[in-house]
Amino acid sequence: MTATRPPALMFQGTGSDVGKSLLVAGLARAYTRRGLTVRPFKPQNMSNNAAVTADGGEIGRAQALQARACGVPPSVHMNPVLLKPQTDMGSQVVVQGKVYATAKARDYYKLKSELLPKVLESFDQLGGEADLLLVEGAGSPAEVNLRNGDIANMGFAEAADIPVVLVADIARGGVIASLVGTWQVLEDSERDRLKGYIVNKFRGDPTLFDSGLEIIGDHTGMPSFGVLPWFAAAARLPAEDAVALERPADDCGKGIKVVVPRLDRIANFDDLDPLSAEPDVSVTFISPGTPLPMDADLVLLPGSKTTIADLQAFRAEGWEIDLKAYLRRGGMVVGLCAGYQMLGKVISDPDGIEGPAGSVDGLGLLDTETALTGDKALYEEQGVDLSTGASVHGYEMHMGRTRGPGLQRPMLQLGSGPDGAISQDGRVMGCYLHGLFADDDFRAAFLSRFREGRQAETRYDAMVEQTLDNLADHLEAHLDLDALLATAKAG
């Protein structure tokens, strides 16, 4: 630990999606309420769900939520390396908020050694403004085949010289094996960093697992910091990655039906969370192999990391035919960011930024054309929806510039100028603004199109804040937060 670095504690999982992100968010809120200045940190993240920082960078959406839990704006230093998958083999590499390279998986391993100094630089930057650093690992340290050059788990913990707590998901089954097995495959120096573990997502009577805690202790010598019961309200908070989209939607009895084609490289799908939070709205992701339903009130085309490739896949699924049939029946379509680009007549990628250079026909539902050229747009915005006068706020995060006659009928008026386009009949529209549905005024006005006189029942930002408070209460009740803090201070 450097002379200026405060106490820190790292949470590593026995696997992906064990709940590390929400655990760190809840702890951040809990310790912040205790009067500590807390900062979240994730050395390396892989997600196409990203957030824009005030200084024009981008980080993983989970770290933005954790920053919110601390009561501070997100910073590029909270997630210095962000991998945004473009294909099954490669990703765009974002370093301290800016695009650094595009690399295939094998090439990225060669990059990691030059990225570690940047990661440690960001960690020290946050340390200069905090009383406590809460660090989230990625994947699992049990993936020892990836240990060489690691900057996400034990490689970072050793470089930064900080203690580690393991997090395991009992809902998956095999939790004893996952904890004992992770401990078993680590090197002795790495085991010495393990100060204990947390069993997450428990259902039922936690005392029934007392014997399981004894078995884990007998095999590893690690103490338990607690067994954390299932927190159902976690579904109200933004999910980090597309694993969440595999879970079935609960649309029983809900009146307004929104359907979203499940694109292969879907990005920033948390745009839909405020709609899902409304008690009379169902948001259903349509998987490949399933036609778009004709009874939807709205079809929404989401963001994508690879616009042209996802448009081609959309066509191959037959969804273009479904969409045009749906519109002939009087339906409504909204495109966000890449979805907006797809609605135009042409998308070109002359420099091969997202894939092979070339140009494809768009869906032809808006009189616009997009070229994936120029610098990446990364900034926060606010303004009004021109159809209703309702306020909107959010952020832009996209490659490409859109032009054409359709822009003479913009959807929004933002501080930087008009944004988006609306078809002449008003049933097809799109824009670049992510997060616009989080504005309660806009969401209420937009949904009133489908239900006359409808009033918004959810105050989304207030709901997120209350859920973070409830999550902190949940952790205070079931985990030994004093012991975790003492572990961080002991180093």
Image (cartoon, rainbow, N blue to C red):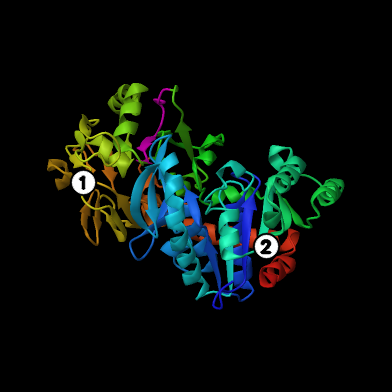
**Picture residue at 55% right of the left edge, 44% below the top:** 146
Residue located beneath label 1 in the image: 373
- Which is more toward the observer, 336 or 28? 28
x and y percent of residue 137 in the render? 57, 53
Q: Are marks 1 and 2 in contact (CB under 8 Å)?
A: no
x and y percent of residue 197 in the render? 72, 54
- Which is more toward the observer, 134 or 303? 134
Q: Is residue 458 visible?
A: no
Q: What is the crowding at mark 1: few (fewer than 14 residues within 10 Å), some, or many (at least 20)?
A: some
In the rendered structure, the answer to whether residue 71 lies left or right of residue 13 reads left
**Picture residue at 56% right of the left edge, 74% below the top:** 2
- Which is more toward the observer, 374 or 415? 374
Q: What is the crowding at mark 2: few (fewer than 14 residues within 10 Å), some, or many (at least 20)?
A: some
Residue located beneath label 2 in the image: 473
**Picture residue at 63% right of the left edge, 69% below the top:** 31
Q: Mark 1 or mark 2: which comes first in sequence?
A: 1
Q: Quadrant of the C terminus?
A: bottom right
Q: Amino acid at mark 1?
A: Thr
Q: Secondary structure at mark 1?
A: loop
- Which is more toward the observer, 452 or 247? 247
| Depicted 350 relative to depicted 213: above or below | above
Q: What's the magenta bit mostly, secondary-structure-wise?
A: loop
Q: Secondary structure at mark 2?
A: helix
In the rendered structure, the answer to whether residue 487 lies left or right of residue 272 reads right
Question: How many numbered callouts?
Answer: 2
**Range of magenta residues:** 291-303
